Image (cartoon, rainbow, N blue to C red):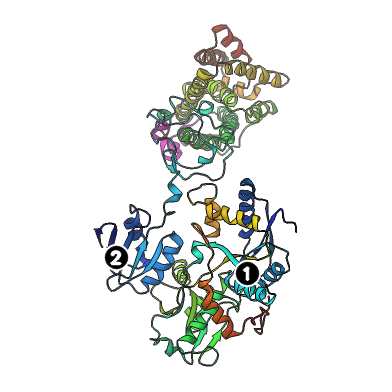
Amino acid sequence: MTIAETSPSRTINIESLSFTSGAHLLLKRALRDLPAGARLGVRASAPDFAVHLRGWCREQGHEYLEGDDQFVAWVARGASAGGRWRQAERAGLSDAKVNDAVRAVPPADWGFAARGAAIEAGGPSFHYALQRKEQVWAENVQKLYAQAVAAQWNPQTAINWEETSSTGAADEELERAVAQVMTYLIENENAALQTPARFIAQIHPHFREVLQLLAVQIADEARHVEVFTRRATLRGGELGLSTVSGRQSLKTLLDEPDFALATFLLSVLGEGTFLNLLWFLERHAPDPLTRQIARLVGQDEARHVAFGVGHLQYQLATDPALRERLAMAVTRRHEALSQTAGLNEEVFDALILLAAGSWRPEDIAAGYARAQTLKDEMRAGRQGRLEKLGFSSAEAAELSALHTRNFM
Amino acid sequence: MNDHTLLLGAVAYDPKVVTIWEGFKGWFHKHGLAFDYTLYSNYERQVEAHLAGHIHVAWNSPLAWVRAARLARGAGRRAEAIAMRDTDQNLTSVIVVRADAELGSVADLKGKRIGVGAIDSPQATLLPLSHLRANGTSPFTDFEVARHDRLAGKHGDHIGGEREAALSLMAGTVDAACMIDSNHLLFINEGSMPAGATRVLAQTAPYDHCNFTVFDDAPRELVNRFRELLLGMSYNDAEVRPLLDLEGLKEWKPGRVEGYRALEQAVEELKFYDDRGNITIADYQY
């Protein structure tokens, strides 16, 4: 191909390339920076080239002019060519670290367009309930996403299943206690999977990193459901008991329609409390496999908590009144659950037994003390996270005490 | 019909026609023109309704324009083409044969079977047949005509007839197929005809396609405003661009009628309409 400039026109030799093999690419490139009305002389030798060029010009808004001895045809660039991009606007910048890369309120009609793309004006409005940066963003979101991706583990290879099938909980009743705790954990993971999933389609895709992080978070929960199920049934037994109160408590998370409040209840208070439970299992579970699972899951959950805290800190910086709403959400949930039985008794007893490791009275006493310590650690952890969100020590202690007895 | 609202007739050759005219209706309203539209199932019905005063302006196929002009003349009135798409100007039709066929010129089509579109398709039937006749081979006597009737009455707006002719060519049931220049490329790109499997044997002279037609009793002020708004639509305008994309144009052009001479000739040759606009062709069900 050769392009020659003979102002104000230009010529191109397309050789034997036909319209059925991509000739239009070369024509578009040659016409791209010509002013409207300027002409492009086209040399070409493909069969039926002029027939196709005529039709192409008409569809593209260029004028087709009959050729002569040298040229198959001349193309006069149309005034409307490129019109589609004349009012195009760049949708922020791809790198969120650059100043103003992420818009505070991206227009609804940017829709699915990539952040940083040049966007043709017009098109349908997407109705995103979460379309303001302050509603979803966190300063640490990029870092957390990078960590989340780097820390993905394969349940098949990251966990030593073989070792445990021979060395697992020696005692059958201990094994049943493990299965009961796993049953409870799965229930909680289901809530932690579906609650953010509800919001994903409500978030403007301009906030790419938030969508990415929540998507990985949901994938984390999917893996957790898998490994807990696999651990519970490792010895061929079935899963344990699921109580009404447990499901009632978790349903209030899924029913919360406000992203900030749901994030607060699920990630900051719920998953935060859950973290203590996982650390407890990492220390006291009777078999190395369960301890290994608790450690891996705990790493993931810590990220979920970090995003929840990071996001609420971000939103609170621009909307301090949110703090009052957060407090009310805890109170409201407490009232909604006040008539329920609280934590599944079977779960708490199973935790005592796991921490005891045997049925000897002195071991049970030690297990009971450890389970009480767990509750204290949970309370202290919640209090610390509430203080990070700007609640006073007294407020934090009061709200922490109102948190669901179901832990999550 | 009142003379406060410009009423346009269009033929519903595809469901998208509703989207197109609802879109234009909203746009005209926004720009102060009271506008509404009526859809017809075929161009014959639309032209007759237009002459009877049921609509002010008709979005006409080239064949509908020919009939409207004849009907108007017969009634002592006058038809005018007020605007058309840029893509309605300077189309050509091609007669396509299989690449390996021993057919070097139009004369070689004698004794062959030629696939055309619907009976009333200007681009895939009337104009190519007229072109072949002008080049020395007459349809029906010198060669057989294989019609591919799809949605008769819609004057070939539906591409199905042309595509079927192309498929017949590939299947070997016809020796040549007629289509718009750009559809040759389209059918190759969509896979109806493999690349390199066909070649263009002949090409008609450029002709024009659709236009907005009015008769001389149309409410002048409304029609002028309509035309002015059409010609003012810019492809650079994000609001109107989706409508222009759907209707297949970059800009509206003032109407012109020189581009219909070849079709007038073809209508005569096939005795499609008489000079007063009556339908005279046999076997035309719409």
- The correct choice, above or below, for A329 with respect to A72 in the image is above
Instruction: Determine which quarter of the picture holds residue B72.
Output: bottom right
Residue B65 screen position, x and y as percent: 60, 71
Residue A276 screen position, x and y as percent: 51, 20
Chain on which label 2 sits: A
Residue matched to label 1: B79
Q: Nearer the viewer, residue A26 or B73?
A: B73
Name the amino acid type tagged 2.
Answer: Ile
Do tag 2 and tag 1 residues touch (Cβ < 8 Å)?
A: no
Residue matched to label 2: A14
Residue A159 screen position, x and y as percent: 43, 35
Task: Identify the main secondary structure in magenta.
Answer: helix
Dot 2 and dot 1 within a common chain = no
Magenta highlight on residue B108 = no
Q: Around disc 2, counting alpha carbons within 10 Å, would you say few (fewer than 14), some (14 to 19), or many (20 or more)? A: some
- The correct choice, above or below, for B134 with respect to A267 in the image is below
Residue B15 screen position, x and y as percent: 63, 61
Q: Nearer the viewer, residue A316 or A271?
A: A316
Q: Which residues are magenta?
A: A145-172
Q: Residue furthest right?
A: B1
